[in-house]
Image (tube, rainbow, N blue to C red):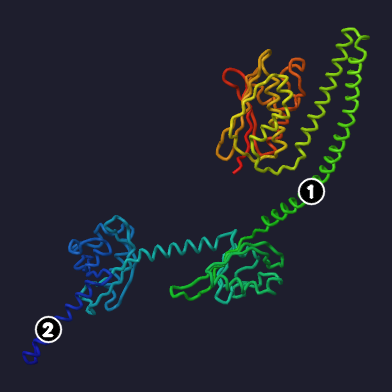
Amino acid sequence: MQCRLNEEECQRTERALHERDEYFRLLIEDASDIVTLLGADGTILYQSRSLTRVLGYDPSERIGENIFATPLAHPEDLDAKRDFLARALATPGGTVSATFRLRHTDGTWRHIEAAGRNLVDDPRISGVVASYRDVTERKRAEVDLALYRLMVESAQDYGIFRLDPDGRVASWNVGAERIKGYAAEEILGRHFSLFYPTEDLEHDKPGQELVAAASMGRFEDEGWRLRKDGSRFWANVVITALRDDHDRLLGFSKITRDLTERKRAEDEVRQLNETLEERVRERTRQLEEVNASLEAFASSASHDLRAPLRGIQGLARVLLEDHAGQLDAAARDYVARIDRAGAGMDRLVQDLLAYGRLGRVEFRPRPVDLGSAVGEALGEVAEALRVARARVDVAPGLPPVLAHPTVLVQVLANLLSNAAKFGKPGGQPRIEVQAERRESRVRLWVIDDGIGIAPEDRERIFEPFERLHGIEAYPGTGVGLAIVRRGVERMGGRSGVEARTGGGSRFWVELPRAG
């Protein structure tokens, strides 16, 4: 076109047109969408550099490539691309659109939304300008949203629905219909407070729950709710506030679960527990009464048993002391045996009473000096040690323990007398008392050089009346070690026995440390 203006104005006009063209070129090159110029047969005549950002390819390498033959095209979308180009060519001045897939350089398929326009009104000139926009994420979000809606709408065990900011029902799934009994058309637009019993409405519980959810973002609770038929069910409800990017409240989502069966089972268990507790209290009271009666009976029986035993022993001694000359050797032996049997019976009665008392003693352990307790126990069994000619060595500095003082002395006395009693025939028993600290406990050892105990008998000897030897060889009642075990266990400890190297036994008791 010939410039009809003066030369200066023509130059100014040409510069302006050039600057405009350059501006539009830069605008196209910097656009976020891919701008493509296509020939009528689908040949790529131009592509903007956005191709690199969106799909990873160099635009110059795609020039001259046909959109139907390019490896970028998805085979299943070729018909859609042909239709897109044909419609664009047949619509001068109009815009057509389509969606198809193109391959990224990383091998993934990207969803592309294309808009094509034949900018030339003259139908004799064919060519299309198209813009390609990557909508992969939007497509994925649409699929996710569709799946989410399907999941929510088909959930049978969860009532999932949405409330507007005022608490009116805006959506309703099949789970909510199953749990509450309302069809969607019956409930949409109605206020959710109709699910609450009268006592909750009087305290505006629905309103309080929405306020809590709006302020904290989430509210969870359990309580009674109403079905359409008026029946109650125990529900777990979670209300979540829905807000936009500007923190404006859009409404609430509410999830309801019917926990009526669980609630019923919990109530039944609680009632059973209450009944059981009452039965336990009643049975305990009865046992306490029985124990009190047994204790009274045991005390009375021991007194009644020991009285004739003392009489038998007394008469036997009178016979031996005052009438020995009238008795032959056999008769004197019989009378001596009667005296010894009476004494043994008396010891058995006393041991049984001691064993029974351990079950009734109220144990309140307190710090006890172990050395003093051993000394007191040695005093109680001094006669037995003298008769056996036993030697006892007590290690110095025995640590304090938590124990019941009286019971501890009784336990130690039984262990010491047991060690003296089961010495080797004709020998002089040697007994050692030692202790060692074991973290929070103290283990006390009573070590002897006696006849020892077979491994298979080391637990049995702690049972009442368990004897490994005849009473003629080793006298006793068979209750002493049972008293040891029961007493130690009542004080929160343990007991046992091991073999001693070179013969004999190592009895031990373990009790909590004091301090």
> Please, what is the three-letter code of the amino acid marked with disc 2?
Arg
Q: Secondary structure at mark 1?
A: helix
Q: Residues within 10 Å of mark 2 (few under 14, many from 20)?
A: few
**Real-space CA distance between mark 1 and mark 2, rounded to the nearest whole angstrom:** 107 Å
Vertical relation: 447 (above or below) 403? above
Is residue 508 depicted above or below 131 in this figure? above
Is residue 142 shown to the viewer in this render? yes
Residue that badge 1 annotates = 281
**Residue 96 location (% of width, % of height):** 32, 73
Q: Is residue 190 above or below residue 279?
A: below
Q: Earlier in the sequence, mark 1 or mark 2?
A: 2
Which x, y percent locates residue 401?
63, 39
Closest to the observer, 290 or 399: 399
Image quarter of residue 194: bottom right
Is residue 497 visible in the rendered structure shown here? no
Which residue is pictured at 75% across the width and 53% down the height? 271
Check disc 2 and report the residue beneath it.
15
- Tell me where residue 414 appears, x and y as whole percent: 71, 28
Mark 1 is on which residue type? Arg
Closer mark to the observer between disc 1 and disc 2: 1
Q: Is 380 in front, or is 284?
A: 380
Quadrant for the N terminus, please: bottom left
